């Protein structure tokens, strides 16, 4: 039993409201099968000692169907050609009520259960004596094991129109059910609907999610309701309003599907079905907003402690991390194999499994890259500019960590290691959310890395987000998270960009091109396109489109390139020209990331046409030209607006480690902050340090500005402290002193 449904064990009296969409089918006729299941569940409840009160809708719908039929058979052909007026709800209710109750009575009789009809109006609840009498009557019926069946007496209701007027003590059968639950001291109210419960949006929207526990403060502003019920009065909006009202008064409520054969019994078993409304629901759920914020704040605090260390101390941490990874390579492999096994069982695509797999030697390679990163120049506190504003007033522009980064990545657990090492090197706090397909591998990698961190920094420097539900909360924390870097599918990146105010750095997809010019060395071209496509097809820097100069079609060079790719097992799809001239299958889109042994082929007129094609259909990630014509190459290199543009080199070189960045947190196609492979420098910002001797502005009369550029050179040595060789500024790193050096 779910902990939030633990109150079920004390339930005895239950009010069940049956919606019109449950009672009737889409054509208006009664849904006999659903009503039969309902009655059987009520029978089982009574047998187990529950007291059951039914509130049923459907009389108006049943009556309307009957009256339409009578109207049809009593009309002449001429009458039927005239516009048909909508039937009034009151006569529909009067005709339909008897038929609906007769059906209930017949079904319950077959199950040896007695039922009774109670029709009420709003006025009945305005009289205290009537309300008392109503409660006494229901209590007597329940003692006799009779099922009271309530419905609003729409036939004589003073309401203006049953589907329009929402004034009064109650205004539909949902609010009537909530009112009766309070009047009769019920222990539980169940509202049956035609959907499984309350969703975050219209149930027909695949992005909508079932809300298992409703919290007014959280969900009231987040839920988007679809259209009202096809047959009833208010649909889910009315149910939520009634459920929230009853729950606040102390009556637990569950909205669930009336289409299920045992939905009511499932609720009483404590199954986690439907949507629960309870006055204490907010106490049962983890405070994700708080926990997400606490995780981000803890990462920021730890990053500030990390920034206070000397370069040698940060270097030592990275060395300890690399040693820990190698020492636990066997354990990491076991967890990775478990993830791979599950991935195969649930049918994850081969391209994702390829990214998920830590092949033999991968951990050693990662450890080696971390050591390379540790031995790189110190990134924090580097002076980029030094200016004398006035005599004795010196301004410096220095590098500084961004703060706290949130990285959301799919499949690739090696990304966790790279990103964590870059965060340590750059002094940033880090929150990581990996894909569910790598949950065990990510967990062991996170454990190994954080246990290698010294206590005076703390393992909260790198937080691992384990629940997908926490991501929306994290994306709201623009005051404590400084940058989001998504690494995954186009869908993932787009969703994140649409869901946060935090700056997002990354690329949505990697539609990389290789253009083979007419002046290309064909042997070189074959080697480059084969490497770009087949070295690692699932990588974001793999070639997805091959562009070929039209001259190679005449010389036979294109045939050689096609043969090389097909021999390697690459499936080719054509753009409009290639499809027409070469009779290869038509590409569904010229902007497509295959991430597999497939690519698009298109024929272009010249380098300018190639550039236009890439601008129109590429992703500004990595694009390459193969040519021996230097002038053409320079046109391509300088006119193409992509994050990385290559001449006579495979697109696979677009990688942080291959660029000498040590590792990469991702590849950015953004045009601000960082572009291309993002290493340590992309995880830094700048700040200004001003040193004076009592200088004041005094309305700009107290300072004679010179704005003189000064030379600078930074030499950061060891933990015993160092001095800038040119400006004599002391760097306050003292051995064993872990106080903040950067003034954060």
Image (spheres, grey):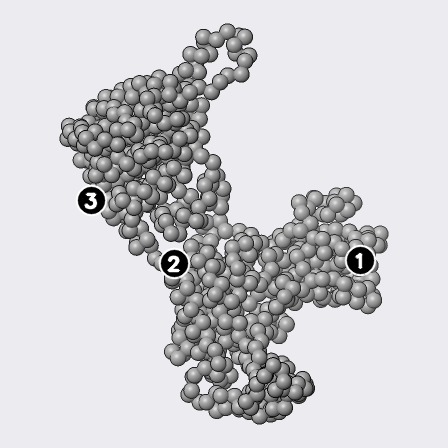
Q: Position of residue 47 (x, y in %)?
A: 19, 32
Q: CA distance from mark 2 to mark 1?
A: 52 Å
Residue bearing the label numbered 1: 608
Residue situated in front as seen by the camera: 444 or 193 = 193
> Which of the two marks, 2 or 1, is nearer to us in this view?
2
Residue 708 falls in which quadrant of the image?
A: bottom right
Q: Position of residue 587 (x, y in %)?
A: 68, 46
Q: Residue at x 37, y 21 (%)?
A: 90
Would residue 311 be found to the left or right of residue 250 on screen?
Answer: right
Residue 376 falls in which quadrant of the image?
A: bottom right
Q: Position of residue 128 (x, y in %)?
A: 21, 33
Q: CA distance from mark 3 to mark 2?
A: 29 Å
Would residue 696 be found to the left or right of residue 543 on screen?
Answer: left
Q: Residue at x 67, y 47 (%)?
A: 589
Which badge, 2 or 1, comes first in the chain's sequence? 2
Residue bearing the label numbered 3: 10
């Amino acid at each position: 039993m779910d902990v939030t449904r633990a109150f079920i064990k004390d339930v005895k009296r239950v009010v069940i409201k049956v919606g019109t969409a449950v009672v009737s089918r889409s054509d208006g006729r009664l849904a006999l099968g659903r009503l039969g299941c309902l009655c059987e569940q009520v029978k089982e409840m009574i047998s187990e000692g529950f007291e059951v009160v039914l509130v049923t809708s459907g009389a108006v719908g049943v009556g309307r169907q009957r009256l339409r039929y009578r109207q049809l058979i009593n009309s002449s052909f001429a009458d039927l050609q005239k516009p048909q007026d909508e039937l009034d709800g009151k006569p529909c209710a009067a005709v339909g009520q008897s038929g609906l109750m007769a059906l209930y009575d017949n079904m319950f009789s077959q199950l040896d259960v007695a039922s009774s009809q109670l029709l009420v109006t709003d006025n009945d609840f305005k009289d205290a004596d009537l309300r008392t009498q109503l409660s006494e009557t229901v209590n007597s019926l329940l003692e006799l094991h009779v099922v009271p069946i309530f419905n609003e007496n729409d036939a004589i209701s003073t309401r203006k129109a049953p589907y329009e007027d929402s004034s009064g003590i109650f205004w539909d059968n949902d609010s009537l059910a909530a009112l009766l639950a309070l009047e009769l001291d019920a222990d539980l109210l169940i509202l049956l609907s035609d959907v499984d419960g309350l969703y975050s949006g219209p149930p027909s929207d695949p992005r909508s999610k079932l809300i298992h526990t409703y919290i007014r403060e959280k969900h009231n502003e987040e839920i988007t309701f679809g259209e009202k019920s096809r047959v009833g009065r208010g649909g889910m909006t009315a149910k939520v309003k009634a459920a929230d009202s009853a729950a606040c008064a102390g009556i637990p409520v569950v909205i669930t599907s009336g289409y299920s054969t045992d939905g009511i019994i499932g609720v009483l078993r404590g199954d986690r079905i439907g949507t629960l409304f309870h006055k204490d629901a907010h106490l049962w759920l983890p405070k994700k907003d708080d926990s997400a914020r606490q995780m981000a704040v803890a990462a920021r605090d730890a990053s500030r402690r990390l920034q206070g260390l000397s370069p040698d101390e940060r270097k030592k941490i990275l060395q300890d991390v690399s040693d820990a990874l190698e020492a636990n390579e066997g354990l990491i492999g076991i967890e990775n194999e478990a993830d791979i096994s599950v991935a195969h069982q649930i049918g994850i695509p081969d391209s994702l499994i390829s990214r998920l797999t830590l092949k033999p030697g991968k951990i050693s390679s990662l450890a080696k890259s971390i050591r390379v990163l540790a031995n790189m120049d110190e990134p924090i506190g580097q002076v980029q500019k030094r200016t004398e504003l006035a005599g004795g007033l010196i301004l410096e522009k220095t590098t500084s960590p961004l703060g706290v980064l949130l990285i959301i990545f799919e499949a690739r657990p090696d990304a966790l290691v790279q990103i964590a090492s870059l965060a340590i090197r750059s002094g940033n706090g880090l929150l990581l959310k990996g894909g569910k397909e790598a949950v065990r591998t990510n967990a062991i990698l996170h454990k190994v890395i954080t246990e290698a961190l010294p206590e005076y920094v703390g393992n909260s420097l790198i937080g691992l987000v384990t629940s997908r539900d926490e991501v929306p909360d994290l994306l709201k924390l623009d005051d404590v998270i400084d940058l989001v870097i998504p690494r995954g599918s186009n869908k993932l990146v787009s969703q994140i960009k649409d869901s946060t105010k935090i700056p997002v750095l990354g690329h949505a997809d990697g539609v990389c091109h290789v253009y083979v010019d007419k002046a290309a060395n064909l042997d070189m071209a074959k080697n480059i396109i084969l490497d770009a496509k087949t070295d690692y097809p699932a990588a974001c820097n793999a070639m997805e489109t091959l562009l070929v100069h039209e001259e190679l079609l005449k010389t036979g060079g294109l045939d050689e390139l096609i043969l090389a790719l097909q021999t390697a097992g690459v499936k080719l799809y054509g753009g409009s020209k290639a499809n027409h001239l070469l009779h290869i299958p038509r590409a569904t889109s010229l902007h497509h990331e295959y991430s597999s042994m497939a690519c698009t082929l298109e024929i272009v007129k010249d380098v300018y046409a190639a550039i236009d094609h890439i601008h129109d259909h590429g992703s500004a990630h990595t694009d390459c030209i193969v040519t021996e014509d230097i002038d053409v190459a320079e046109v391509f290199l300088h006119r193409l607006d992509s994050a990385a543009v290559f001449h006579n080199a495979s697109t696979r070189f677009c990688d942080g480690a291959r660029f000498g960045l040590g590792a990469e947190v991702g590849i950015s196609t953004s045009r601000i902050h960082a572009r291309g492979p993002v290493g340590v420098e992309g995880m830094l910002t700048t700040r200004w340090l001003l040193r004076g001797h009592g200088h004041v502005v005094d309305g700009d009369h107290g300072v004679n500005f010179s704005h003189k550029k000064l030379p600078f050179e930074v030499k950061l040595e060891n933990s015993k402290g160092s001095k800038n060789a040119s400006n004599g500024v002391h760097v306050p790193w003292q051995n064993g002193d872990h106080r903040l050096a950067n003034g954060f």
